[in-house]
């Protein structure tokens, strides 16, 4: 089956016209896609690029991997049945879970591929879409947990799922972060144990939420292993943000220096995955941290370093950086100017690309 045939079949299965599919993509992603271009995809006159493959994955509710390249219909149907069903009704969840158990579920390599896809999609897709789809994946993977390696998969999925809830809500996000840490412990994989705790710490620290939990998880990550890794880097930077928000400038700066040292040894070349920390993302961490500390010169330098290498396909992170400048203005005493600057930056980003973290950052700036 060609990619064009697959798009056509998925569209018809929903009862949509080519125009309706184009409209759904335009409404969700603010594009100017025309019906004729959908027709060209379906006739294999042109293949959708990476951006439109992600759009199609979201609006048609299928894993991105299914859309990439030619796939057999049988493979697609079994994969879609196991992983792409929207988890809305309890009976549907039970059906998906038991079906996965009876079939044995995806292989470990399949799961690692799914994790890679979600890591990339998280960088540009909305929390609601990711939450809905990952919840379905969790139903499937819990049926395979007699394999220790799949506890590692489950822990990373749980961490991603937790990030779709606001850390300030005090229950759901923290509950899932703790579950992820426990699941990672079951895997016996120290890399996963450090990573899920570190990722939770930087998420909560960046959001300025549940700082006690952020510190606890960061301390656990750092106690598990002192080897330089992305997990340890996230843990250190999470603690740095927690210290900054408490007004402990000396500790925050000391941890930032430690974070830079770890980055030099463990920073990643992958640019567009939630599982990666490349140079631009490290500078996003530093830009907000130094803005919170009122270090205008340092914040501006980190801002420019991040903007210089930030991939164009990640406008949400460009908005983060502009809002850091809004926070810097408020720290310097210009509250009205800082709030207006941040609101303007957020207003330029299409609403469907707003994240929970951006909204919480806006609340911090207003406060």
Image (spheres, helix red, strand yellow):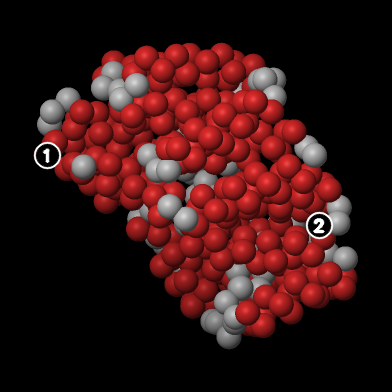
Q: Earlier in the sequence, mark 1 or mark 2?
A: 2
Residue at 45% over, 37% down: 212
Instruction: Measure how far apart labels 1 and 2 are at the Cα level.
Output: 52 Å
Considering the image in quadrants, where does the C terminus appear? top left
Instruction: Residue 216: tell me if it is visible.
Output: yes
Q: Are marks 1 and 2 in contact (CB under 8 Å)?
A: no
Residue 290, x across and y down, in percent: 34, 23
Q: Is residue 329 above or below residue 272?
A: above
Circle 2 residues within 10 Å: few <14, some 14–19, many ≥20: some
Residue 263: where, in percent of width, then height?
A: 58, 20
Residue at 50% across / 57% down in the picture?
Answer: 172
Task: Determine the residue positioned at 39% across, 50% down.
Answer: 168
Is 6 in front, or is 227? Answer: 227
Image point 86% across, 52% down: which residue?
A: 147
Mark 1 lies on a secondary structure that is helix
Q: Which mark is residue 145?
A: 2
């Amino acid at each position: 089956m060609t990619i064009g045939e697959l798009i056509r079949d998925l569209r018809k299965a929903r009862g949509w016209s080519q125009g309706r599919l184009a409209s759904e993509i335009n409404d969700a992603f603010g594009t100017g896609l025309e019906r004729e271009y959908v027709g060209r995809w379906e006739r294999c006159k042109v293949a959708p690029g990476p951006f439109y493959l992600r759009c199609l994955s979201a609006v048609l509710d299928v894993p991105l991997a299914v859309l990439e390249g030619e796939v057999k219909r049988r493979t697609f149907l079994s994969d879609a049945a196991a992983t792409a069903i929207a988890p809305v009704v309890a009976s549907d969840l039970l059906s998906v879970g038991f079906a996965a158990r009876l079939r044995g579920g995806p292989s470990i390599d399949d799961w690692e591929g799914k994790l890679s896809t979600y890591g990339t999609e998280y960088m540009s897709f909305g929390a609601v879409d990711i939450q809905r789809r990952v919840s379905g994946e969790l139903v499937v993977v819990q049926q395979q947990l007699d394999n220790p390696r799949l506890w590692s998969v489950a822990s990373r999925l749980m961490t991603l799922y937790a990030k779709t809830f606001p850390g300030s809500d005090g229950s759901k996000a923290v509950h899932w972060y703790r579950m992820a840490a426990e699941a990672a412990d079951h895997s016996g994989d120290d890399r996963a144990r450090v990573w899920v705790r570190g990722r939770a710490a930087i998420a909560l620290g960046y959001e300025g939420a549940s700082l006690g939990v952020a510190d606890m998880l960061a301390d656990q990550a750092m106690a598990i292993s002192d080897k330089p890794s992305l997990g340890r880097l996230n843990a250190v930077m999470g603690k740095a943000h927690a210290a900054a928000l408490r007004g402990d400038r000396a500790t925050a700066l000391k941890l930032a220096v430690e974070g830079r040292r770890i980055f030099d040894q463990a920073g990643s070349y992958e640019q567009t995955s939630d599982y990666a920390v490349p140079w631009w993302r490290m500078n996003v961490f530093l830009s907000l941290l130094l803005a919170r500390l009122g270090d205008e010169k340092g914040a501006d330098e980190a801002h420019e370093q991040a903007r210089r290498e930030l991939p164009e396909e990640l406008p949400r992170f460009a908005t983060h950086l502009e809002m850091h400048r809004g926070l810097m203005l408020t720290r310097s005493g210009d509250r009205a100017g800082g709030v207006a600057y941040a609101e303007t930056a957020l207003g330029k980003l299409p609403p469907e690309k707003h994240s929970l973290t951006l909204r919480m950052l806006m609340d911090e700036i207003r406060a």
